[in-house]
Image (cartoon, coloured by chain):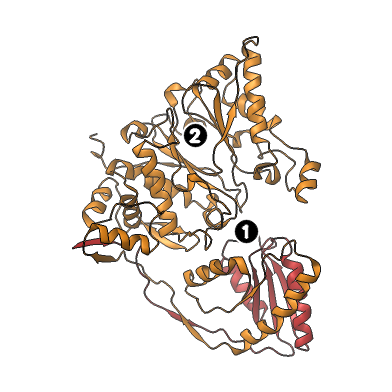
């Protein structure tokens, strides 16, 4: 049985039901226990104990529903508008209208990937329901995806289902984290994923739909519901959609996926759990030479990353993200930097004093650095030229530190007229 | 009429019974699994003290998710679950903050 703090009661009900054991006894105590005054904690324990005994000894054998097999079922509505209302009412949307997932629409997406619709991509936490390719296609249709977007969606789903991504924890945490999808290689142009001005803003169909499709999979297959199973205290807009391509042609550095071991001609995605972008301003001083300009950019990026506001300095783990605008990237290159030296400089300077972290939080497992090694910092080029780059601190917790995962994109020949 | 597909991946089928009742008395071993959030283990210690006052002779085994190498929100894997089940007659877990 479980002792559940009050604010987590809905999530506990969800997990119990998801695991096919809805009748597991729960005793609810006030929230929070952590940090509560000693007398309140003792009172809660004293109140809980007799109820624990009663629930353990009074319960009868019960039958749970353990999902032995799941098949995508169908529903019928009078028309599209009614179907949309039903989808909203059933909690199957992100709050915005969706495209009704008819068989024809789903089949059109399924034709774009060389997988059987029943192929199992893995269990999606926190519900641990299985993501078949078909189920992903249903959600991708709802997100507004075209067939050409779907291979990217499938790759993103496979990436988050890698155990090292720690998806269940990412879905459940109170941290405001969302999976960021970075698209690499030829599929960027084939699927029209934007890497330029406003790439993380509205107006780019592929960026919007691909990111949204992943979110709908996480909600509908994974069961992540705000305040019930997705406990992010505030969330952030990236939980609607969070997808962009790297501006490889604008970058003076090797593409990020090449740095991660892939060939430049390989199409892939990298997915990592990130906070919302933190804008970082660096105004080029006219009196500085190339080395000074580059140093100034690195100093402000370090300040943005090494903040006591973010998890990375406390955990000392994760893959923090740096998105350089092409102008800042050129200035760094002119100052003699490449990807490795940028990572090394950031790792050296983006940190917080350990004793300050302990003073603020009581605990700090790391040494004040934002990650374990320089190469853990993900650096890519995207956006428009100007004064602003961006950093995205990451969740950095979980069994594996919520590692960034890179997954190849594959598609059915002919999907892109190829 | 519009026929559309279920976004959740389908409906479940099949089921298996599970027992929820335990006899609690002298010699019963109650397991306590803390979730590793601050205060979780000390709270369960207090719960154990109270249960010990209510039922004479009950014994306790204690674990934390950290000790088991697990994050608070991760399900206990089956091999570890088997160990817990073998070690106690009933298990009380901490859930939340």
Q: Residue A399 location, x and y as percent? A: 61, 54
Instruction: In the rendered view, tell whether residue A236 sits above or below residue A281.
Output: below
Q: Which chain is red?
A: B
Q: Residue A37 location, x and y as percent? A: 78, 65
Who's the residue at 26% across and 58% down the image? A81
Taking depth in this image into account, of A47 and A52 the one nearest to the observer is: A47
Q: Residue A417 location, x and y as percent? A: 22, 35
In the rendered image, the quadrant that contains the N terminus of chain A is bottom right
Image side of residue A158 versus residue A3, left or right: left
Mark 2 Cα within 10 Å, few/some/many (few <14, many 20+)?
A: few
Taking depth in this image into account, of A51 and A342 the one nearest to the observer is: A51
Helix, strand or loop status at disc 1: loop
Who's the residue at 29% across and 52% down the image? A99
Image side of residue B89 versus residue A189, left or right: right
Q: Tag 1, which chain?
A: B
In the rendered image, the quadrant that contains the C terminus of chain A is top left
Who's the residue at 70% across and 38% down the image? A369
Question: Separation of disc 1 and disc 2 at Cα?
Answer: 29 Å
For residue B71, the mark is 1
Instruction: In the rendered view, tell whether residue A187 sits above or below residue B17.
Output: above
Q: Decide if residue B7 is in sight here.
A: no
């Amino acid at each position: 049985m479980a002792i559940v703090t009050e604010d987590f009661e809905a999530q506990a009900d969800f997990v119990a039901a998801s695991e096919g054991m809805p009748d597991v006894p729960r005793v609810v105590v006030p929230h929070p226990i952590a940090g509560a005054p000693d007398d309140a904690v003792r009172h809660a324990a004293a109140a809980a104990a007799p109820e624990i005994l009663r629930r353990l000894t009074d319960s009868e054998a019960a039958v749970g529903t353990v999902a032995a097999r799941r098949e995508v079922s169908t529903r019928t509505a009078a028309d599209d508008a009614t179907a949309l209302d039903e989808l909203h009412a059933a909690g199957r949307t992100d709050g915005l209208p969706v495209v009704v997932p008819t068989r024809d629409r789903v089949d059109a997406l399924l034709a774009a990937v060389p997988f059987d619709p029943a192929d199992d991509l893995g269990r999606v936490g926190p519900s641990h329901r299985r993501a078949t390719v078909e189920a992903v296609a249903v959600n991708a249709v709802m997100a507004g995806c075209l067939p050409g977007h779907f291979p990217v969606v499938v790759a993103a789903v496979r990436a988050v289902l890698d155990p090292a991504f720690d998806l269940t924890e990412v879905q459940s945490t109170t941290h405001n984290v969302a999976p960021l999808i970075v698209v690499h290689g030829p599929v960027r142009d084939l699927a029209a994923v934007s890497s330029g001005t406003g790439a993380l803003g509205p107006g780019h169909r592929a960026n919007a739909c691909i990111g949204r499709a992943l979110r709908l999979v996480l909600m509908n297959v994974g069961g992540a519901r705000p305040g019930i199973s997705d406990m992010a205290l505030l969330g952030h807009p990236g939980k609607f959609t969070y997808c962009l391509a790297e501006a490889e042609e604008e970058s003076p550095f090797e593409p990020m996926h090449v740095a991660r071991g892939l060939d430049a001609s390989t199409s892939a995605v990298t997915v990592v759990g990130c906070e919302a972008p933190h804008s970082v301003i660096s105004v080029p001083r006219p009196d500085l030479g190339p080395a000074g300009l580059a140093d100034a950019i690195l100093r402000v990026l370090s300040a943005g990353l090494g903040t006591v506001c973010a998890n990375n300095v406390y955990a000392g783990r994760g893959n923090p993200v740096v998105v350089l605008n092409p102008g800042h990237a050129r200035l760094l290159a002119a100052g003699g930097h490449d990807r490795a030296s940028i990572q090394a400089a950031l790792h050296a300077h983006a940190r917080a004093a350990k004793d300050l972290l302990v003073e603020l939080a009581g605990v700090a497992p790391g040494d004040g650095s934002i990650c374990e090694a320089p190469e853990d910092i993900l650096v890519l080029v995207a956006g428009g030229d100007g004064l602003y780059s961006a950093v995205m601190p990451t969740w950095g917790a979980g069994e594996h530190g919520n590692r960034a995962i890179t997954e190849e994109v594959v598609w059915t020949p002919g999907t892109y007229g190829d | 009429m519009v026929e559309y597909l279920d976004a959740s991946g389908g409906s479940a089928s099949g089921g298996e019974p599970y027992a929820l009742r335990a006899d609690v008395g002298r010699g019963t071993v109650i397991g306590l699994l803390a979730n590793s959030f601050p205060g979780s283990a000390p709270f369960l210690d207090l719960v154990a003290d109270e249960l010990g006052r209510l039922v004479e002779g009950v014994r306790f085994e204690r674990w934390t998710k950290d000790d088991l190498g697990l994050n608070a929100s991760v399900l206990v894997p089956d091999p570890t679950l088997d160990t817990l089940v073998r070690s106690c007659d009933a298990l009380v877990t901490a859930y939340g903050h």
